[in-house]
């Protein structure tokens, strides 16, 4: 890798980090298409390298949210720790799954979750004041089980697809757990930072990570996530949700187009 290419990747990482901080995701939905489509890394290597970048990026954004006092820490721990367990197991099996299957799973989940966020943003009577007490799970045990189930699902997809899981956590936290989009993004970033860690270790042990690409991206994503969290505080709730959905759809389409081109 040339010095110029390294710098360009770091600048791309800065943009991804800013968007990650704004939307409460680790950045995998942007990193995977970039590595796969632009730099021609394999789907598995792109997914593994994405996770390698996602954890420090999410931790950087989480630190800013913690300073602002915006995170439901208990919910994030429930989701993150259960997701970390699932991510460990699914990362081990990711190498057994054909690249096309990984890409199709990622694209379908991304587009579905985008539709969920759009529905929430446009529904009549949508408000800016979320409250976890208004979730569909009224009892404390029910709410705890829902958070654990969400973490297990997000973690399983994280290990297989290489995404941090924020694109799953956010729409479900909004639609089922009673959070506003901004509250969900804060919980998501914290959870994603936890979920990604065991997946990184597993992929590293299996030799799936392209470290030089990952390090170049991290030079940009880590400071970028802090910038993005500060920017998100100034953006109204509904436009933020709709912009997030547009980002998800674009990323999902890019994943599919790239895989089709590779197969031609």
Image (cartoon, rainbow, N blue to C red):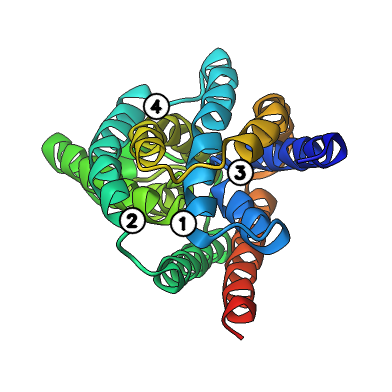
Q: How much space separates mark 1 and mark 3, taking CA atoms? A: 25 Å
Q: Earlier in the sequence, mark 4 or mark 2?
A: 4
Q: Nearer the viewer, mark 3 or mark 2?
A: 2
* Residue 56 rendering spot, x and y as whole percentages: 54, 27
* Label 2 environment density (alpha carbons within 10 Å; few <14, some 14–19, many ≥20): many
Residue 23: mark in rendering: 3
Q: Earlier in the sequence, mark 3 or mark 4?
A: 3
Residue at 60% x, 19% y is 64
Q: Nearer the viewer, residue 144 or 134?
A: 144
CB under 8 Å between discs 4 and 2: no
* Residue 238 rendering spot, x and y as whole percentages: 64, 52
Q: Which residue corresponds to mark 2?
A: 94
Q: Earlier in the sequence, mark 1 or mark 4?
A: 1
Q: Is residue 17 above or below residue 124?
A: above
* Label 1 environment density (alpha carbons within 10 Å; few <14, some 14–19, many ≥20): many
Residue 72: mark in rendering: 4
Question: Left or right: 119 with respect to 38?
Answer: left
Q: Which residue corresponds to mark 1?
A: 44
Q: How much space separates mark 1 and mark 4, taking CA atoms? A: 33 Å
Q: Nearer the viewer, residue 28 or 89?
A: 89
* Label 4 environment density (alpha carbons within 10 Å; few <14, some 14–19, many ≥20): some
Q: Secondary structure at mark 4?
A: loop
């Amino acid at each position: 890798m040339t010095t110029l290419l390294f710098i360009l990747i770091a600048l791309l990482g800065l943009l991804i980090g800013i968007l990650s901080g704004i939307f409460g995701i680790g950045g995998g939905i942007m990193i995977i298409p970039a590595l796969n489509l632009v730099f021609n890394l394999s789907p598995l290597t792109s997914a593994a390298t994405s996770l390698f970048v996602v954890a420090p990026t999410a931790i950087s954004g989480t630190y800013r949210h913690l300073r602002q006092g915006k995170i439901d820490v208990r919910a994030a721990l429930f989701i993150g720790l259960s997701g970390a367990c699932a991510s460990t197991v699914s990362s081990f099996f990711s190498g057994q799954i054909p690249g096309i299957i990984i890409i199709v799973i990622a694209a379908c989940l991304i587009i579905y979750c985008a539709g969920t966020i759009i529905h929430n943003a446009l529904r009549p009577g949508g408000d800016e004041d979320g409250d976890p007490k208004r979730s569909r799970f009224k009892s404390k045990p029910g709410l705890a089980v829902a958070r654990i189930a969400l973490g297990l699902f997000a973690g399983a997809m994280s290990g297989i697809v290489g995404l941090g899981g924020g694109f799953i956590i956010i729409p479900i936290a909004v639609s089922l757990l009673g959070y506003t989009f901004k509250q969900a993004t804060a919980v998501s970033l914290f959870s994603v930072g936890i979920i990604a860690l065991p997946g990184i270790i597993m992929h590293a042990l299996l030799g799936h990570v392209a470290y030089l690409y990952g390090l170049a991206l991290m030079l940009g994503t880590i400071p970028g996530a802090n910038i993005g969290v500060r920017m998100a505080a100034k953006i109204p709730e509904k436009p933020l949700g709709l912009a997030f959905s547009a980002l998800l759809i674009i990323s999902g389409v890019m994943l599919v187009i790239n895989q089709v081109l590779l197969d031609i």
